Image (cartoon, coloured by chain):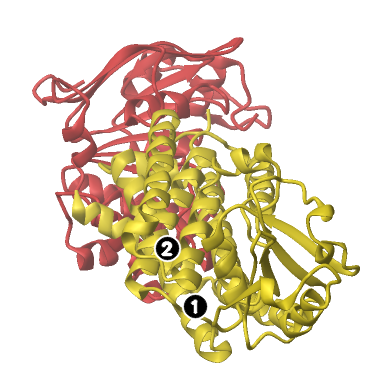
Amino acid sequence: MDESRPIALEARNLVKDYPGLRAVDGISFKVPEGICFGLLGPNGAGKTTTVEIIEGVIGATSGEVYYYGEIAGSRFRQEAGIQFQNTALQDYLTVRETIQLFRSLYDRQANIDDIIEQCSLGDLLDRDNRKLSGGQRQRLLLAVALVNRPRLIFLDEPTTGLDPQARRNFWELVQRIRADGATIVLTTHYMDEAQILCDDIAIMDEGRILTHGSPQELLHARYGDQLINLSHGEIRRPNLEDLFLDLTGHSLRA
Amino acid sequence: MFKRIFAVFAARNREFIRDRSSLAWNLLLPVALVFGLSYAFDGQRDEYTVGVLQVEAEIDTALHQFLETRYVRFVPYANLEDAMLKVERHQLDLLIDVGPPTRYWINPTATKGYFLEFALLQSASTATSNVIKEQVEGQPVRYADWILPGILGMNMMFSCLFGVGYVIVRYRKNGFLKRLRATPLTSLEFITAQVASRMVLIMLITTVVYTGTHLLLDTRMEGSYVTLFIVGLVGAISMISLGLVVSARVTSEELAGGLLNLINWPMMMLSGVWFSLEGTGETVQNISQAFPLTHILKAARAVILDGATFTDVAPSLGAMLLLSAVFLAVGAWIFRWEQF
C-alpha cells in the first residue's frame, strides 16, 4: 500500500448479522486515494453486503465506515458514485432523462456531455432505458454513477453477464475514469478483471477477508518463483485464480 | 432540497403520462361509469315515497288513514328542512305532518306528488278544510348528479392508493428505492415528491373528467367550483397518505395488492359511492367515519347538490386533514427503503 496517499475509505470491523447467518464477519480494510481496490470472492462470500454497508444502503450490525477520516455521512453521499449489481431505473425514461434525474439529486454535478461521451452513450440518448442491451445498460448505470463527479466510485460486479467484447470495453472505461484520479472500489468474481484493473485486492469468503495486498505481492508471498505444471504439460506462472482456489477451495463461479 | 424533490416529481410524472394504458384507464373508467350508470339508473323511481314528519322511528298508521295507503313507502323524517330538501329534489314525492293540523308539502312539478295529493285529500277521515298545503319548488336530482361525485371519489381512491402504494412497493422490490437511497435524496424528499406528483396528476384527471361529464350531462352544481376543488385537493392528500402507509414497509406486490383491496372494498361499499348511507345502522355509519372517502363524498355532494360553502364543509375538510396527518405520521415512521 502506498503510504503517501491519503486514505479515502476505511472500513473498521464491519459485522452484518441476518437471522441464522453472519453475512459479514469483522471486515476491516483501507483504500488509499486514487487506486482501484478489488474485493474478490465467490458468490455468497459477502462482497455485496460489505459494499452495501459501506455505501450506506444497508445498516451494519456493528462497525464503522470512514470517508477521508470522517464517519461516512452527507459528504460521502455527495461525493460517492455507485453502480449496483442489480438495480432498476425509473420506467419510461430515456437514457438522457435518466442521467438528468440522478444528476439533479447532487450538489456536485458533472458536465452531462462529458459523461455521455465518456460512457459512449451518444447514440442512445433518446432510447427508453428498458430497451438497452446488457452492455448498453451497464454503460448507463456507470454514467449514473458518474453524474456527481465522484471522488470515490463503487462498481459491484459491473461486468457480470456481459460478452467478452463488452467486458473489455468496460475495463477500458474504468481505466480512463481511474486515470482521471477517482478512487475505485470494485467487487468481482472474475479474477482476470481484478488482475487487469486492481492495484490492491482483498479476497474474502464466508464474510471474512482471507488475504489483502497488491496482486503481485500476494502471488509472490504465496508462490515465490514457483511455476504451475498443468495436466497437458504446459507450465505457467500462478495467477489470482490459482491463489483464490488455494485460499477458498471454491470454484470461482460456484 | 427543492431541486431534488422537483427532479423526482418530474420523473414520476413522465413515467405516469408515458404509461398510456394507466393514463387511459384513469381517464376512461370514471367517464364510462358515470355515463353507463346514468343511462342505466336515471329513470324515475317506481315506488311512491312519502316522508312523515315525526320524531319516532316507527310510523303509527293509526294516526292518519292516509298512512294506510297501499303501494306507498312511508319514511319518517325528524328534521323538516332535510325533508323539504328531498321534496325539492323529487327524492320524496310528498311530505306530511299528520298534525293536527295536518300539513303537507309537494313539489308542483312532481307527477307522483300530484297523484299522492289526490289520495291524501280523499282519505276518508280528512276534510279538505283541515289540511294545509305547502309548495316546494326545485328541479329533480338525477342519478347522474348524485353518482358523479361518487365515481370521481372512487377513481381518486384507486389512483391514489395504487398509484402511490403499489408503485412504491414495486420500486422497493426492483431495487430502484435502493438506488435512490445511495444518493443524497432523503426519505422525506422522496415521499414529498411522490405525494406532489400524484396530487397534481389526480387533480388534473379529476378536473378533466368532472368538466367533461358536467358539460355533457349538464349535471347539477349549486356551490362554488373553488370549494369543490379544495375538497378534491384535501381528499387526494388523505388518500395518498393512506397509500403511503400501505407502501411504507411492504416488499411484495402481491401482499400490497391484497392490503390495498382490503382497504378499497370496505371503503367503496361503506362510504356512499353507490348508495346513500342514510338509513344504514349506527355501526356502519361510525365505521364509515374512519374512511377518507366518506368525508370526500359528503363534502363534494354538499357543494354540488346543496350549494354548501367552504365553512359548511370545513368539518369534513378537518376530518380529512386529521386522517392525513395520522396516515403521514405512521407512514413516515415505518417507511424504509430496502427490502430487508
Image height of A225 relative to B279, above or below: above
For this orientation, the residue located farthest to the bottom is: B216
User: What color does chain B have in the rendering?
Assistant: yellow
Query: Cα distance, mark 1 to mark 2?
Result: 11 Å
Q: Residues within 10 Å of mark 2 (few under 14, many from 20)?
A: many
Q: Secondary structure at mark 2?
A: helix
Task: For mark 2, name the chain.
Answer: B
User: What color does chain A have in the rendering?
Assistant: red
Q: Position of residue A89 (x, y in %)?
A: 45, 55
The residue where tag 1 is placed is: B210
For this orientation, the residue located farthest to the left is: A4
Asked whether the beta carbons under mark 1 and mark 2 sit within 8 Å of each other, the answer is no
Q: Position of residue A241 (x, y in %)?
A: 52, 28
Q: Give the residue drawn at x 53%, y 48%.
A: B165
User: What quarter of the picture does the C terminus of chain A occupy?
Assistant: top right
- In front of the other: A145 or B335: B335
The residue where tag 2 is placed is: B232
Report whether B339 appears left or right of A149: right
Say if residue B143 shows up in the picture.
yes
Give the quarter of the image for residue B253. top right
Image height of B314 relative to A122, above or below: above
Report whether A74 appears left or right of B228: left
User: What quarter of the picture does the N terminus of chain A occupy?
Assistant: top left
Task: For mark 1, name the chain.
Answer: B
